[in-house]
Amino acid sequence: MPYLGELLALASGLTWAGAAIFFRLSGQTVPPLGLNLFKNTLGCALLTLTMGLTGQALFPGLQASDYILVLASGAVGIAVSDTLYFASLNALGAGLAAVVATLYSPFTIALSLIFLKESLNLWQTVGVVLILAAVLAISYRKEGHSLPRKKLTAGILAGVLAQLATAVGIVMIKRKLGGWPLLWVTNMRVGGGLLFLAAPILAHPRRKLLLEPLGRKANWKFMVPATVLGTYLSIITWMGGMKYTQASVAAALSQLSTVFIFILAILFLKEKTTPLKVAAVALAMAGAILAAAA
């Protein structure tokens, strides 16, 4: 199917936008580590059920090195990345966190150039510069800024590291991705994230505080739809985009979630907008579109 990878990348951006709003609401009562554990557990269950219903093997006959590589990708790109992203989301709000998340494209493009030998043209270079300018714009603070400098800086730093981890997690498996079953690799990555999170949470001195909110059914009204959209639908379409087109192109197209998150945050989270926020989103999206130029 022509442009299958591009269409899947766009679909991942749409579903992730909805997930980000629910994750933001969940983050008001659930800490990042606990939220990540919940969504990986439910996400893995949904993916496993889907594989069973479609008759796909949970453990196909691949080399042990393939399993290790995919699990490691999940540890970096899901366990580490999503925990940092949730921390950034809580600190910055959905709108600003979405702008910082556009760094995912430049990071993925840069790593693809270095390790996958993908090419970057002039317009893609301009796009990367615009995205960086957008992130710098939201880090600017003048008197009356709604966020304290310390919280703003911590949120941006967490978001930057989250997107770097995401990029590393996908680029490290990109070369072999085309030969792996889509649902299997998606499920194994989520499983890798789950395994990597389980040990530190169980050893955490305040694990009861991390786990207790997960048992409250009142929190499920946001955590469940966030997981279905973000750790099931979005991650399948995102991995599909990465599988069927260049990593640099898929990364940029999925970044269209930024605009949708910005709009949804205003409508449903009542986040305030400013000319600076609007300018930052416009810069980020222009950069994402240019970065997708082939």
Image: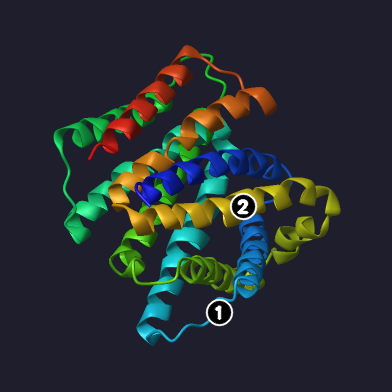
Q: Position of residue 69 (x, y in %)?
A: 38, 74
Q: Which mark is residue 58?
A: 1
Q: Which mark is residue 249?
A: none
Q: Give the foreground label among 1 and 2.
A: 1
The three-letter code of the residue at mark 1 reads Leu
Label 1 crowd (10 A; few <14 / some 14-19 / many >=20): some
- Estimate the spatial distance between the alpha carbons at disc 1 and disc 2, rounded to whole Å: 29 Å
The residue beneath circle 2 is: 32
Q: Position of residue 255 (x, y in %)?
A: 42, 39
Is 113 left or right of 77, judged from the image as shown?
left
Labels 1 and 2: the sequence-earlier one = 2
Tell me the residue at 20%/32% (across/down). 123
Of residues 118 and 54, the one nearer the viewer is 54
- Asked whether residue 187 appears in the rendered view, the answer is yes
Quarter holding the C terminus is: top left
Tell me the residue at 28%/66% (across/down). 175
